[in-house]
């Protein structure tokens, strides 16, 4: 199974929240630690990954509503 990183965050909790949103739509995902920020008091940097076949659906679910600029 091929996994693709769709988002990176400066805080692991953000990636975990996005993971919960995807899980509520039955889209498998995983959170990977990617940085050493936790050692510098910045929290733990993380990446959110989904299966390649779910990439576009996941990106649409996590994107801001139309008309809102992020």
Image: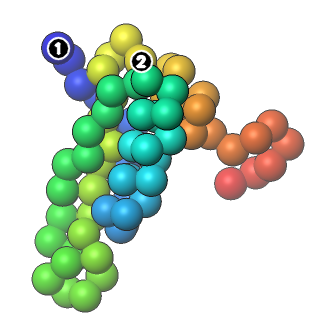
Residue nearer the viewer, 15 or 56: 15
Residue nearer the viewer, 20 or 35: 20
Residue 49: percent from the left, percent from the top? 30, 35
Residue shown at 20%/17% (left/top)?
2
Q: Is residue 59 left or right of residue 32?
A: right
Residue shown at 53%/21% (left/top)?
57
Judging by the rendered image, the residue that carries numbered circle 1 is 1
Does residue 17 lie above or below 19 as drawn? below
Does residue 58 lie above or below 20 as drawn? above
Residue 35: percent from the left, percent from the top? 18, 64
Residue 64: percent from the left, percent from the top? 69, 44
Residue shown at 20%/48% (left/top)?
32
Using the image, tell me which numbered label, if any, was put on residue 54: 2
Q: Quadrant of residue 42?
A: bottom left
Residue 34: percent from the left, percent from the top? 18, 56
Does residue 61 lie above or below 8 as drawn? above
Q: Is residue 33 left or right of residue 12?
A: left
């Amino acid at each position: 199974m091929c996994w693709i990183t769709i988002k990176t965050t400066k805080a692991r909790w953000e990636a975990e929240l996005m993971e919960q949103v995807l899980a509520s739509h039955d889209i498998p995902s995983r959170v990977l630690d990617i940085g050493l920020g936790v050692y510098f008091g910045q929290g733990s940097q993380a990446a959110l990954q989904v299966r390649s076949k779910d990439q576009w659906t996941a990106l649409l679910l996590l994107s801001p509503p139309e008309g809102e600029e992020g």
